[in-house]
Amino acid sequence: MPDRNWSHLLDVPAFPPERYAKLADRLAALMKTRNDVLLIQAEAVLALEAVATSLARPGLKALNIVTSPYGAWFGDWLKRGGSDVINLVADLGRPIAIEAVRQQLDENPDIAVLSLVHAESATGILNPLEDIVRLARERGVLTVVDAVASIGGHALNVDENGIDVVVIGPQKSLAGPAGVSAISVSERAWTMLRHESAPRNSMLSLLDQKEQWLETGRGVLPGTPAPLEFFALDAALDRLEAEGIDAVQARHHLAAKATREALVALGAELWVDDTLASALVTAVRLPADIDRNDLLLAARLDGADIGAAVGPGSDRLVRLNHTGRRASKEAVLANIKAFAQALQLQGRSRLGDKAVEVVDAVYSSSGAK
């Protein structure tokens, strides 16, 4: 046999066809839904664009909640398809106010679709998902939720809340691969997706996915599957199920609590109150006299993950990441130590030891290691 440079990343065997349906069912269980679940062979942005493109058509009126660039993109995709879109834009970098949603729904009784992002990694905010979906259901409005970041970090009960379309990705709180995503679709949503303008013979066509995968028995995915991504997703779900989804969510909330309390001990200004904050990242507003780039350079310690927030209104914000496998005491401590050092180099807080003690106390009181 000739010699060759073999690698587990090359010449990957085909993912067993009978396991695709099992993957979809496992993701459905995480979302707590009996709705159809489509597997999309791309990062979740494509899945979101597919939903918007498949729904969009002239005569469709949509209320699109914008709390980050992702929400803005979704509205653009709906408009591209001819839909009448009301972009309800939150205060810069902030969650949407429920009263603003109520007002738009009351003033526009012909709204047929409402779309929003659940948790924003861009600025560390959390939108009031359950309250918004409740308002929409009372008016018979179809709901579309981007739960790409929130799944695994926050509770998501699709059937109990009555959410029609949910897009998730495993690369954030689930600590899985980025090259595959999933869409949960209710029967009511399928009815709205069947229209003359719906895309066909396209990667953006949900109807193609329905006909070519769901209606053929969920055996072989359309196109050429990327087996490495699906093996990675399978392994990520094995790890997640061994820990338990409730434990994963609790781990994220504990990391967020420890991070926030330690930052307060450092004298930092948290961007939003606890009730408005996601468990994925914690955003801090820097004082006007601190250069953000200088602080981020000073915060580059081993194990730390601190970066600039993203989107309008975030120019003074930095975010400490505690998503996925980083939702741990070790990662939280690395972030806090790096942030404390960066502040000290800027001539600010010298309370790094106190902040570390706070993290230890939060984890000790929880019984977690």
Image: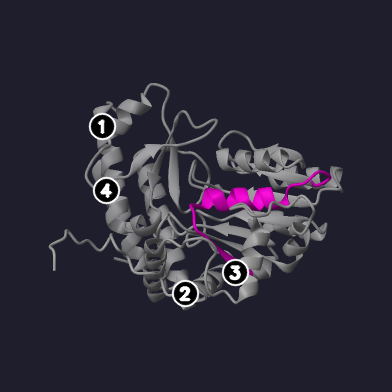
Q: Is residue 366 left or right of residue 27?
A: left
> Are circles 3 and 2 on residues that touch, CB within 8 Å?
no
Residue of label 1: 344
Marks 1 and 4, how far apart in space?
15 Å
The magenta segment is 36-60
Please name which of the two marks, 4 or 2, marks the residue nearer to the observer: 2
Marks 4 and 3, how far apart in space?
45 Å
- Residue 351 visible, this angle: no
Please name which of the two marks, 2 or 1, marks the residue nearer to the observer: 2
- Point out the tag, 3 or 2, that comes first from the N-terminus: 2
Between 15 and 346, the one lying in front of the other is 15
* Mark 1 neighbour class, 10 Å CA radius: few under 14, some 14 to 19, many 20 or more: some
Q: Amino acid at mark 1?
A: Gln
Q: Amino acid at mark 3?
A: Trp
- Point out the tag, 3 or 1, that comes first from the N-terminus: 3
Q: Quadrant of the N terminus?
A: bottom left
Which quadrant holds residue 205? bottom right
Marks 3 and 2, how far apart in space?
11 Å
Residue 308, label in figure: none
Q: Whole-percent x and y of residue 282? A: 43, 45
- Point out the tag, 2 or 1, that comes first from the N-terminus: 2
* Mark 4 neighbour class, 10 Å CA radius: few under 14, some 14 to 19, many 20 or more: many
Q: Is residue 206 left or right of residue 136?
A: left
Task: Say which element carries label 4.
Answer: helix
Residue of label 4: 334
Residue found 52% across the figure and 54% down from its top: 148
Residue of label 3: 213
Which quadrant holds residue 222? bottom right
